[in-house]
Image (cartoon, rainbow, N blue to C red):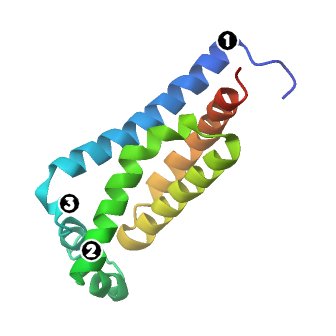
Amino acid sequence: NLFPVTIVETGALYYISFQVATSYFLAGFVKIKQKNWRNGTALLTFIESPNYNSPNIFKNLLRIKGFSLVTSWSVIFFEICFPLIFAQNSYAALIWIGLALLFHFINVILFGLNRFLIIWAATYPALYFVVNNFSNSP
């Protein structure tokens, strides 16, 4: 805040943002190629694994075929579409980032993957900076 942003700092923020968007996209791309994600069974398989101590309410919800299918496709759609954040204004970017935080918070509840929440959340200020620069560009 005390000094103007240099080209190196800006480049680093763009790099972090590109990596975040690419990571989400690739995760969704891998999922869409897998039959168990497309038919809605992947999440139930994960949540019923003995590796995770997921709440029973979520296990019961994911046993409902329609709920599981919608949930799987929501994850795929969110991840594949995440790079569209760069085409949004800064307000819409905050909504995308809020959805991403919610996504990772749900993963904490379901799978105990709290390190992902912290790591991904640490990248969101850079992402917001870049989107804000895009939306303010002529």
Q: Which residue is mark 1?
A: 7
Residue, x 68% and y 31% (percent of image)?
A: 135
Task: Name the residue type under label 1.
Answer: Ile
Quadrant of the drawing holding the C terminus: top right
Cα distance between the residues tagged 3 and 2: 9 Å
Circle count? 3
Q: Is the residue 8 above or below the residue 64 in the image?
A: above
Labels 3 & 1 near each other (Cβ < 8 A): no
Q: Quadrant of the N terminus?
A: top right
User: Regarding mark 3 in the picture, which secondary structure is present there?
Assistant: helix
| Tag 1 near tag 2, CB within 8 Å | no
Between marks 1 and 2 in the image, the one whose residue lies nearer the viewer = 2
Rendered location of residue 56, percent (x, y): 32, 87
Q: Nearer the viewer, residue 111 or 95?
A: 95
Who comes first in sequence, dot 1 or dot 2? Answer: 1
The residue beneath circle 3 is 37
Please determine whether, in this image, residue 10 is positioned above or below residue 32. Answer: above
Residue 119 point in image, percent of width and height = 50, 46
Of badges 3 and 1, nearer the viewer stands: 3
Q: Is residue 45 left or right of residue 73?
A: left
Q: Amino acid at mark 3?
A: Trp
Foreground residue among 97 and 6: 97
| CA gap, disc 3 and disc 1 | 41 Å
Q: Indicate the amino acid at tag 2.
A: Ser
Q: Picture quarter containing residue 126?
A: top right
Quarter location, residue 40: bottom left
